[in-house]
Amino acid sequence: MTLMVYELNEVPKKLFNFYADTFPKSAFATLRNNSRLFETETADVGALSPWITWPTMHRGVSNIEHEISDLGQDLSKVNAEFPNIFNVLAENNVKVGVFGSLQSYPLPDNLDGFDFYVPDTFAAGSECYPEQLSDFQSFNLSMVRANGRNVSKGVAIKDAGRFVANAGRLGLTFKTFNNLAKQVVTEQVKKDRVVRRRSSQAEIAFDIFYKQLVDTKPDIAFFFTNHVASAMHRYWPTIFPGDYPEGKFEKDWCMRWQGEIPHAVKVANYQLEQLITLSKKTRSELLVCSSMGQGAVEDVTPISKQVLITRVKSLLSYLGIGEDEWEPRLSMAPRVVIKPKTSSLIKKLERLENIKVNEKKVNFHVTSTNDVRFDLDLTNVDTLSVSENGEDISASEIGIEIVDLQDASGSYAYHIPQGILLHYQPEKPLNAKAGTNWDKVSVLDFAPSLIKKFEGRVPGYMQGENILFAG
């Protein structure tokens, strides 16, 4: 018997209820009508991002304590001070499986308590446990690099070839292979469908996870997916047009992209169907959760073009920074993050103060672990004017360009503090109020509740309560 944790990133109660009501025979409806329901509230302050809110949920302390603020930052200090729930459980003789949970890189030093461990899709390396899963992770990371603000039709041939050669052994199913083939063919006829590759990655990942889950039978297993969140950010107005002033979005745009959130949900729904079936078969429990949610951004402006740093190597070279002085970090576009390898790099970046792009600065921020994040906020512009100390320079020389957004979308929905947590127990009947009452809890309750579930000792620094499995 395994406790399965399906981390459905950023899905709020509103979307979950909408699909449960619209499709009463779906896995969404089954879970909504047969689970204990919780609406979670993040404990974080300041700007909300999944790479901040998931560590809060996993570690039982807010971002004020854990100070995680960016993808790819060095977590060695916080891992020692506030270890994540995976390591706490593993050290309490609980067999753990991890697949893609945010901020889960690098692998733990001691893997004795883990049946499998695949870090998140922004990992700095492809190391996995067992080692054979690294073929999947190499391919996965290569696709993340290729698919930034726009989705690329390209494939990293070397990484893809190595993965495909071992795909069957790793768990890729015929259904998913068939879906992938249909996806590639459909893209040739309906070019917009290339954006669904984000969901294709989730389909591949889930197959690999599911095989590990069934083969190793850990006490608890975590699986993370971002594909629904990605669709919600871009296409929320197509599902909830009433959340915006009338006429905000062109009808043609809404019609063109109205199938994208339903497609993403369909992928998640199938995966949840698989977990529900396994839950019934093995008398296992299932948690479906998000560390926060999304809601409409009412005053947003539709975006068709965005200025991006597309070649950070060129920007750094222009500033006199050599390739041996830094290394790239994967991040969510439009952010660009690097790790300095020399103490002089930050001083050289001060030259950015003199560079203007359409009269705006390229800002940089040094994180708490000394990584560097670049930010440039320019949208819906047709021309670029780049200068240094008033002298014109070429935009291409510093690796900056105007990118046409393939779906003409901005962040039409964005992060809100409220998320979801559903606790499904196939052997435990619920009362008539199931499916309607969502109890409010803090995300800080998640980690201590899991520790208590497995009869462990809750660390004193955890601020939440053991309430998720009570009653």
Image (cartoon, rainbow, N blue to C red):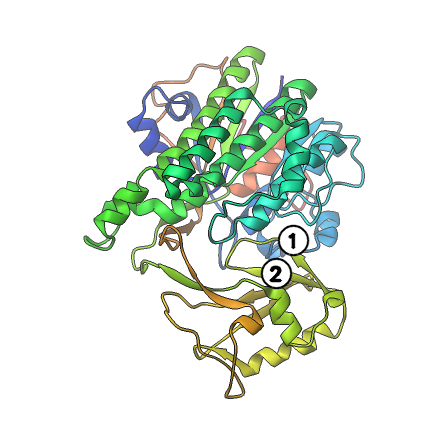
Name the residue located 76 percent from the left edge and 30 percent from the top edge: 113
Say whether marks 1 and 2 touch (CB < 8 Å): yes
Q: How many marks?
A: 2
| Residue drawn at point x = 69 percent, y = 29 percent | 96
The percent position of residue 77, horizontal first and vertical second, equals: 74, 54
Q: Which residue is mark 1?
A: 72
Query: Could you tell me the amino acid type at mark 2?
Result: Val
What residue appears at the point 44 percent right and 42 percent down from the top-left corner? 194
Question: For this view, does 64 lie left or right of residue 385?
Answer: right
Residue 88 in view in this figure: no
Where residue 337 appears, as percent x and y from the top left, is 61, 60
State whether residue 335 appears in this view. yes
Query: Is disc 1 surrounded by few (<14), some (14 to 19) or many (20+) residues within 10 Å?
Result: many
As helix, strand or loop, the secondary structure at mark 2 comes to: strand
What residue type is disc 1 on? Gly
Q: Position of residue 177 (x, y in %)?
A: 53, 26
Residue 184 percent across, percent down from the top left: 47, 35
Looking at the picture, tell me which residue is in the foreground, 245 or 172.
Answer: 172
The one of 221 and 348 positioned closer to us in this rendering: 348
